[in-house]
Amino acid sequence: MRLFVFFALELTGGHFVNRTLIMCVCLLGLALTTPHAAQLAEKYTKIDGSANPEKVPAWKAWESVFRFATSDIDRWKEKFDITDAEVDILLKEAKLHPKREGRCLETLRALALKDNVDRAKSPAFVTAAIACRTETLVAGERVMAAMSPEGQAAMSALLDHVKIGLTLLVPEGEEAFFQQPR
């Protein structure tokens, strides 16, 4: 079995949080393979958000915001001038994220095991992955819609900050798939 992993390095203010490297392991699915060394040595394309933030998809930025909101909200609130009411809006969606993400991962894992094929070549897997990413984007849109224009500007700045702090490793050949849906 091969486990597909994307690593995200979370930088804050030019320093690693707690002087440790935070790795976000996002399961996008499992594919059954014969465990040959050549198969395990996948090649990856590195997306460095500090050099190319435009290559970090919006769904990934929102996913990171939701994942770290509860631990980083006080720092973000101060740095980006987010009001208490806007913090409540963000935290409400952030609290829903683990359930949403868990449901998506279960679906993707089941499809990868059922199809027993490359995930990027499985129409059902691709459709489900894009639906999961769309759910994250819709949650982000709900956050933005509930905020004042000033809050929306602060959230946009926060998303840009998060994108700059991400370094992602994407399996070669899956770059276009990783960018979907937007």
Image (cartoon, rainbow, N blue to C red):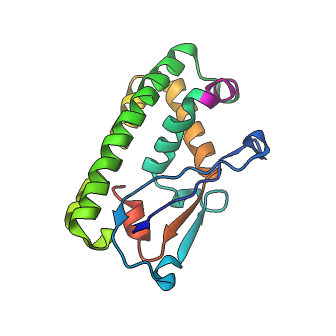
- Asked whether, in this view, residue 22 is left or right of residue 66, the answer is right
Q: Position of residue 154 (x, y in %)?
A: 57, 31
Determine the residue positioned at 55% across, 41% down.
159
Magenta residue check for 142: no
Determine the residue positioned at 43% across, 55% down.
27
Which stretch appears magenta? 71-78
Rendered-image quadrant of the C terminus: bottom left
Q: Quadrant of residue 141?
A: top left
Camera sees residue 135 = no
Determine the residue positioned at 79% across, 44% down.
19
Residue 18 versus residue 93: which sits nearer the camera? 18
Residue 177 versus residue 125: which sits nearer the camera? 125
Rendered-image quadrant of the N terminus: bottom left
Q: Position of residue 125 (x, y in %)?
A: 26, 61
Q: Position of residue 149 (x, y in %)?
A: 48, 25
Considering only vertical position in the picture, is 52 above or below 131?
A: below
Camera sees residue 63 = yes
Determine the residue positioned at 70% across, 50% down.
21
- Asked whether, in this view, residue 134 is left or right of residue 40, the answer is left
